Image (spheres, grey):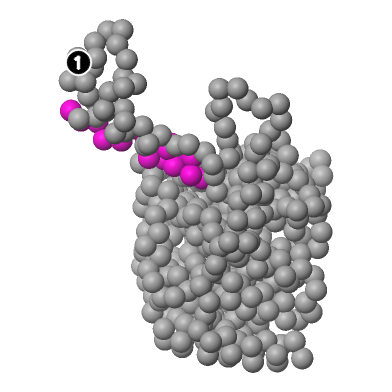
Amino acid sequence: MTLGTDRHVGFSVLSQDDIVKIHEASLHLLTKSGMRVGGRRALDLFAKHGAKLDGDLVKVSEAMVASAIDAAPKSLKLYKRDGSEYLEISPGGNQVFYGTHSDQLELLDPFTGQARPFLRADNKLMCQLASYLENISFVLSVGMSNDVRPEVQTQVTLLDTLRNFDKVTNFSTNDVDSLHDCIKIASIVAGGLKNLQEKPFVFNYCEPIPPRTHPTESTEKLWISAENRIPVVYMPYSMMGGTSPMSMPASLAQGHAEFLMGLILTQLVSPGTPVIYGHMPSILDMKTTVGSYGAYEFHLLIAAGAELSNYLGLPFFGTAGCSDAKFLDEQAVAELTMEIMSTTLSKANLIHDVGVLDHCNSVSPEAVVLSNDLIEGLKVFARGVGEINEKTLALDLMEKIGPGGSYVTDPHTAKNFRKVFYSGLFSRKMKNPDKSEVREKILAVINKAVNEHQVPELDSSVLADLAKIEAKLMA
């Protein structure tokens, strides 16, 4: 299994009393105020289990909430494409795993330095890079290739991702019909739906629409994921002052309630369906009207969301390693570092959007490589100072060396100095060169991933079956 970032140092945003107050406020929204729910079969299912309906306004009981929390699995295993164990996630655990995108609206081309529309061929670049980098554990397959018909972008992108990526794939779909296709594609790679259910190497991503609305597409995607026992993340993305109140506690309570409504639906459809708690409460920037990905408030609230998820005993899905900047400049580097450090020390488990820039319009391979190095370095913080005992205090050694002595040539130094982190990108040369070498080192990593790293090929029979699906989609 992969080793994520071991956490023995952390911080808390919310007290236990804060968490209880937010949860109780969410219960009020669910039981007294209600949620808008789309989809006839979702409405009928809620009504069958005792929810109160007024048209599409649904009010659930506290018992329904508690039952759903009890039914959902409290840990999750995700596998590599070949079926080998890879990630094990438990709330409150000491590991966090990071992921990037296999596609996006735009690519910040590392070879030209220009932002351009993302093309289907770019998917292989992103997958090879993510497969090569040690600290990237999954990719998000979105379905946004500019040179593919919109009706089949989701399916074609997943096809290309599963051909070119061997770790975990998180996928989203443009519509309900394409979700069926995506489950079929993943099942072919797994050798059947049963194998996929037993050793999932994919998980689905879907969202409600804040404030407190669960349209038919959202409820249907949750339903289909649940009946097929595909792990699913439900991620409210709100903007304070726009789609949630201009209040951090209120935004947390609203998003918590929105997630819980999705959780209830999945457990009513199929109790025990693996569900991952998602929460992205950002700000509506009143200067520009964008939903910020680099706001300090955003990442503080993601850490708080991880604590709410931990309270429920569920795995958490969040965001870090992204920026509002258009290019990998000073702003981007500052935001990437702040976010990865915050998330590494929080209670988060799965973190996506690494290398996403320009308010989630583009993905930068260079930013992914830089983030991979930052994640590795920040493991030092997360591990803490280690166990304190007679051996690590080294009193005998200090007695031997004495005041004014030197530890440079002592065997203790030779034995332990490799525990220090040495960046693959940053330098501590005695005499620094007159210009930065970081960009050249990043490009060297990308070139090595593209030209030398080989992602294991799928079995020829699987590739043939995928080719048949592709031919139908592209016809």
Report crowding for label 1: few under 14, some 14 to 19, many 20 or more residues within 10 A (C-alpha): few
Task: Specify the segment rendered in magenta.
Answer: 375-390
Q: For this rendering, which residue is in front, 248 or 226? A: 226
Mark 1: secondary structure: helix
Q: Quadrant of residue 152?
A: bottom right
Q: Is residue 389 magenta?
A: yes
Q: Position of residue 402 (x, y in %)?
A: 24, 10
Which residue lies at the image location 71% right of the left edge and 37% below the top edge?
331
**Percent position of residue 452, x then y:** 58, 61
**Vertically, is 232 above or below 338?**
below
Which residue is painted at 82% across and 44% down in the image? 288
Comparing 44 with 99, the one in front is 99
Q: Main secondary structure of the magenta part?
A: helix
Q: Is residue 327 above or below residue 223?
A: above
456 is higher (above) or lower (below) than 278 = below
Name the amino acid, label 1.
Lys
In the visual, does 37 lie left or right of 95? right
